Image (cartoon, grey):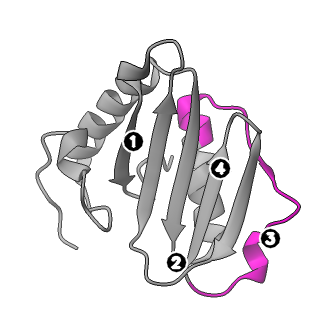
Amino acid sequence: MSASPLAGLSDLAGLRSAPTVDGPARQRLREQLEARTALCSWFTIGVMAPSGPAALEALRACERALGWTPLEPDPAGSTPGSLTGPVFLKGNQRIGRFLLRSETGLGEGILITGHNPDDPDQEDTWGPLPLDLFAA
């Protein structure tokens, strides 16, 4: 997919896969996401990726960039290296775990849902964000 001019997070809603974004759009997405996540108390994350290692890499980069405590693998899930082909990783800060499973037919990208029980108006789902949005 070619680079796309994005005004911001709202332009991603409804996309099947994350677009490729350039430097200014990448910075704009990160700034808007950081502002929105600052209003939430906990998060769930979904990572649609071509492989288990790619999903885990995207999760860890997101955790580092947003200052989240690293999630632990759920014992009921698969290990990243044990899966071939497309995967879906679902992480939940509330329980501190992520689950990884094979999943075909998905796009690629990161979905983040912010939760705020004290102010539900701040809750939302953002994405799909590029898998490498938080890469160093």
The kind of secondary structure element at disc 2 is: loop
Instruction: Check residue 2 in the rendering and tell me which mark sits there, or answer none.
Output: none
Q: Nearer the viewer, mark 2 or mark 1?
A: 1
Amino acid under label 3? Thr
Which residue is tagged 1? 125
Residue named by callout 2: 50
State how far apart marks 4 and 3 are (Cα).
Answer: 14 Å
Which residue is found at the position 26% from the left and 62% from the top? Answer: 20
Residue under label 3, please give it: 79
Which amino acid is tagged 1?
Thr
Q: Is residue 24 visible?
A: no
Q: CA distance from mark 2 to mark 1?
A: 22 Å
Element on which disc 3 rests: loop
Magenta residue span = 63-85
Q: Earlier in the sequence, mark 2 or mark 1?
A: 2
Res 123 quadrant in image:
top left
